[in-house]
Image: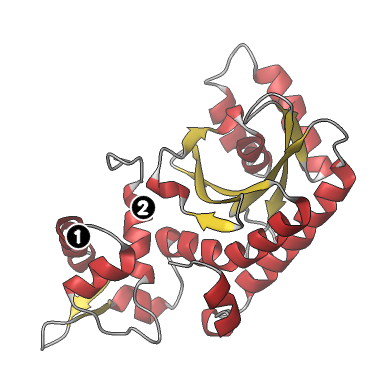
Amino acid sequence: MANSPSGESVVARLARIVAAFDHDHEFLNLTSVAQRTGLPLSTAQRLVVDLLAHGFLERTPDGLLRAGRLIRQHGAPGPAEAFVRLRNAAVPLMESVHAVLKAQITLAVLDNDETLYLERVSRGSTATNLTQKVARLPLTSTPSGLVLLAHQPPDYQESVLASTPGESENLRVVLAQARTAGYFTRPGIIREGTVAVSVPVLGNDDAGLPAALTAVIPEEDAQIPLTVAVLRSASFAISAALKRPPELSRPSPEILLSSRRL
């Protein structure tokens, strides 16, 4: 799927637009959509036209935009909206994990057969939307991608491994270990002297895997069990938030004040 010059996917941009409509912002004009999403007006206009054509948005008689019949009738988020809901549920917990571990924390999802990084929390405990930058990597190149791949169906795993013939046997072992252990580690991903530790975040049915949560910690005196325990606690909390209806998952004003959300 085509990316913007910043590296942001069409899915991510559509997600921003869909997520702009909530209980407090049921009706928006095009300018408000652009302001709430941070997209250029011309980009917002082009994507809104596509969403209107496919029924994800519709116009009211007075010319305002609102969520379309597909979203209202089915009441279930599509992939783009689900990414935004996942990100918004995860950000406050990622900031808490960062405060405990003093490490860079990332949130990644599987999108278009790649690892798409939705969020990063690093120094200063400030969420940084990675979809504003080049944030896509091959599934087999990072712990996040390997954790995502480890929890996919075998047929899908094999289709990905077919593109790495020289490494497929070793990767099969790695994927099996990651799934069995419930986490995966690899040194030197971000820079020398660090270790990346990744855990899965389960979806609404405890079967789907919407995300991988990763911490990058110093390799010297690395406390892997502690890091895994902290990440897993956050993972369980994110999963619990995703299981609640959207109206029950909205954050408190205190969280909104301390955490940048879409």
| Residue pointed to by mark 1 | 50
Q: Is residue 44 left or right of residue 87?
A: left
| Residue pointed to by mark 2 | 11
- Residue 241 in view: yes
Please give the name of the residue rendered at 33% of the width and 83% of the height, measured from the top-left corner. Answer: 25
Q: Is residue 144 left or right of residue 87?
A: right
- Residue 17 in view: no
Residue 50 at x, y percent in the picture: 19, 60
Q: 181 or 17, which lies in front?
A: 17
Marker count (numbered)? 2
Please give the name of the residue rendered at 60% of the width and 37% of the height, measured from the top-left corner. Answer: 145
**Quadrant where the C terminus lies?**
bottom left
Q: 246 or 7, which lies in front?
A: 7
Real-space Cα separation, disc 2 to disc 1, in angstroms: 12 Å
Q: Amino acid at mark 2?
A: Val
Tell which residue pokes out farthest to the top in this image: 166
